[in-house]
């Protein structure tokens, strides 16, 4: 079935292109477009992400070098850096956001049964942001400091499978805590937050929505201990308390009791104090849940290292958001490919194989199977000597 088709074309088969066309129609992305469609734009940017192209000129040169294969890879328009730049500048970035949301739903279904590392069955999300520094002259709309610009990626991550549920792209001047107002809270779900989201009015809104949060406590938090609960010190627990906030402002913003959990991490020799509105789970599970928040940090590190996300092909807000959502779509595509083909490889390994084989005309599974074949192990002790003894 895949004989004679490029690996890039086979890879695009995993994308729901009818959904993409509906997104284009929703925002009239192809209105008065004659030769370079939104699909051509998406394919160019996805190719750039998969092969880590550095510029529009780089994208143009690589694709034009394979001109005879482009039609069968799905391209219908002529590849030109000026046309691509114009499309990134003016075509609504929400086309690619809505399309990525469909990929998110697919990926979450595939990774629904991924182990969390602890015995826990509810939905767990980690919410955090990462900052990408930019040049103030080129990105004045994202001014962060007096001589500096930056964009922030505020990400809600489904900890099972490390799937980004939603991403908000803002200028660096936007405070992280403000993005809590954009969350669509799920009753019964857990939200893992670091100390940058310490706003008791917003935390109280999570409680009112029937959801739960786990966050780090600040050292200057004023409270009154109402009661203490039994703990197991060998597990690392130091205290488990029900408290009431007593600060003049905090007691008004969060007027009901909280739970304060004190945990000692022997591996890092550090003491951690957590606040949560869940009073039913064991204290140790609360501490272990917060440790799962590290998944969002790993996600940020992965996309910065393996996708084109730290430098942009355009300078407008629309171009930046378009590139971010196509990058996330690429991440989701690799995650979906891994599950659908049952690959026992990391996402990084899959991306590395794809980056050098997109133009090859072999069944897509062959390259991954070839990678899995073990080479004979060499004796690590065999080493050439520089000098005769």
Image (spheres, grey):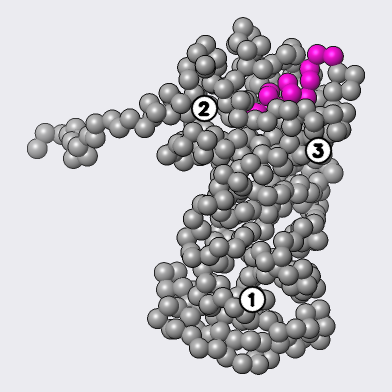
Residue assigned mark 1:
278
Residue 13 position in % (x across, y down): 61, 25
Residue, x 76% and y 49% (percent of image)?
168
Mark 2 falls on what kind of element?
Answer: helix
Residue assigned mark 3:
94
Distance of label 1 from label 3 (alpha carbons): 36 Å
Relative depth, front residue between 148 and 222? 222
Q: Is residue 179 magenta?
A: no
- Say left or right for 51 vs 250: left
Q: Is residue 38 magenta?
A: yes
Q: Dot 2: within a 10 Å radius of its alpha carbon, few (fewer than 14), some, or many (20 or more) residues?
A: many
Distance of label 2 from label 3 (alpha carbons): 27 Å
Residue, x 68% and y 24% (percent of image)?
43
Q: What range is drawn magenta here? A: 34-46
Quadrant, the C terminus: top left
Residue assigned mark 2:
354
Mark 3 falls on what kind of element?
Answer: helix
């Amino acid at each position: 079935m895949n004989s004679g088709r490029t690996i890039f074309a086979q890879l695009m088969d995993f994308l729901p292109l009818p959904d993409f066309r509906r997104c284009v129609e929703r925002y009239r992305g192809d209105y008065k477009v004659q030769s370079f469609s939104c699909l051509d734009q998406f394919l160019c940017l996805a190719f750039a992400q998969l092969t880590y192209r550095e510029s529009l000129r780089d994208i143009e040169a690589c694709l034009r070098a394979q001109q005879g294969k482009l039609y069968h890879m799905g391209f219908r328009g002529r590849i030109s850096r000026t046309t691509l730049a114009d499309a990134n500048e003016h075509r609504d970035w929400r086309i690619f956001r809505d399309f990525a949301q469909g990929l998110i739903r697919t990926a979450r279904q595939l990774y629904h049964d991924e182990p969390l590392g602890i015995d826990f069955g509810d939905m767990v999300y980690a919410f955090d942001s990462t900052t990408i520094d930019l040049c103030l002259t080129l990105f004045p709309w994202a001014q962060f400091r007096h001589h500096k610009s930056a964009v922030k990626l505020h990400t809600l991550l489904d900890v099972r499978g490390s799937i980004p549920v939603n991403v908000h792209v803002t200028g660096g001047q936007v405070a992280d805590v403000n993005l809590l107002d954009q969350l669509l809270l799920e009753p019964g779900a857990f939200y893992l937050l670091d100390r940058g989201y310490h706003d008791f009015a917003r935390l109280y809104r999570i409680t009112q929505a029937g959801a739960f949060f786990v966050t780090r406590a600040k050292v200057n938090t004023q409270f009154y201990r109402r009661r203490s609960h039994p703990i197991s010190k060998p597990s690392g627990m130091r205290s488990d308390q029900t408290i009431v906030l007593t600060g003049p402002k905090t007691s008004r913003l969060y007027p009901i009791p909280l739970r304060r959990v004190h945990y000692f991490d022997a591996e890092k020799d550090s003491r951690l104090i957590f606040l949560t509105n869940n009073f039913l789970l064991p204290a140790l599970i609360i501490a272990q849940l917060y440790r799962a928040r590290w998944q969002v940090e790993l996600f940020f590190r992965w996309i910065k290292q393996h996708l084109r996300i730290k430098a942009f092909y355009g300078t407008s807000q629309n171009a930046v958001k378009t590139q971010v959502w196509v990058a996330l779509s690429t991440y989701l595509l690799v995650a979906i490919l891994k599950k659908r083909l049952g690959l026992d490889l990391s996402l990084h390994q899959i991306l590395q194989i794809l980056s050098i084989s997109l133009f090859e005309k072999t069944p897509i599974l062959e390259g991954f199977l070839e990678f899995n074949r073990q080479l004979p192990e060499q004796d690590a002790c065999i080493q050439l000597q520089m000098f005769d003894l």
